[in-house]
Image (cartoon, grey):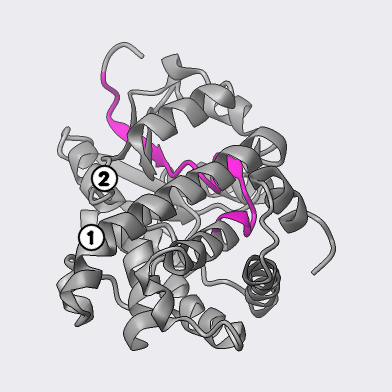
Amino acid sequence: MIGMKKKAIVFDFDGPLVGSGQDKAIHILFSAFVACHDTGFRKFLHPDHPELDISKMLKGLVNYPGAPRFQQLSAIVSSIVRDIPEAVADPHELCIDESLVNEYQKLQQRYNEFYSGLNEAAAKRFWKPLKGVKTLIKKLSKDYDLYVASGIIQDILEKDFQHHKFDRKLFCGIMGSNQEGNIDKSMILKQIKNRSYQDVLFIGDSRKDLEYARKAGVKFFRVKSAQDYKVLVEKMKQQDLPDVQDMCEFTEQQLQRIRSKTLALMNQYLSGKILSYQEITTFINSKNN
């Protein structure tokens, strides 16, 4: 895209561009469980009563939807270890033995491996760009500079963007997190805003995305489905770039599905039944609990 326009629209990737439903929430929870189970953090789990663990883990998840992966992981681990659903910057904050502090990197590596494997398997078979979004992007690019701001690690984001065949020429930047996962979307949004745009709109799908927009001082609009884009287009006819204060929480029905699917996978893992990434994502997208 040549030249700089007066206003910019920034898309989160998962959700607003590529629909993943509640899959990622289940991926996050199950990967965190596997990472704990396969490391010294297993001592904090309750293999005879996994429902206790999923209840704690959900508290960490709902506090950090759309956050960088290792921030999400630390909030879930904190929930498991000390029943406090808050992310930590340093494992020492978990008040654990030094041996476990030293093993935290191993926990992150196992989580990263498993979570990436699930996402890759789901992206190949189940996740698709929202209906009509590519046509809308082409139209919007005529009047606005377009960006992607995601918590996904940069190289994975680049691969996903290419896999789903989005037209890179229509975007001024495809911007993700670093390998450490400590660059969040508010930082990226601030970088974009500092390019002296008159107005910036961030299109996200979670409460955390709204928080990132507020922190960066940009507008926000929630998109979870293709229908939401129709609403956005109508609002833009009336007020150009709208600003919607929608907290975007999970519904009770969605939380129940996330809990049920994750708990079933946890029970299978505890029984010694190890499924492939493809089998796991197929189960998640089946109608069976």
User: Hey, which residue is sitting farthest right in the picture?
Assistant: 287
| Residue in the image at 31% along x and 34% along y | 7
Closer to us: 224 or 127: 127
Residue 144 sits above or below residue 28 on the image: above
Residue 280 sits above or below residue 142 on the image: below
**Where does label 1 land, which residue?**
215
Closer to us: 277 or 180: 277
| Residue in the image at 26% along x and 40% along y | 178
| Residue in the image at 66% along x and 71% along y | 254
Quarter of the image for residue 64 reads: bottom left
Contact between marks 2 and 1 (CB within 8 A): the answer is yes
Which region of the structure is painted magenta? 4-24
Quarter of the image for residue 4 reads: top left
Asked if the stretch drawn in magenta spans residue 8, the answer is: yes
**Where does label 2 land, which residue?**
189
Label 2 is placed on what type of residue? Leu
Question: Residue 280's spot in the image, x, y percent?
Answer: 69, 53
User: Hey, which residue is sitting farthest top in the picture?
Assistant: 2
Judge whether residue 103 can be spotted in this image. Answer: yes
Which numbered disc flags the more N-terminal residue, 2 or 1?
A: 2
Label 1 is placed on what type of residue? Lys
- So how many labels did they put on this image? 2
Report the side of 203 relative to 231 (left or right). left
Question: Residue 277's spot in the image, x, y percent?
Answer: 64, 46
Question: Residue 269's spot in the image, x, y percent?
Answer: 64, 65
| Residue in the image at 18% along x and 65% along y | 89
Please, what secondary structure does the residue beneath circle 2 have? Answer: helix
Looking at the rendered image, the quarter that the C terminus falls into is bottom right
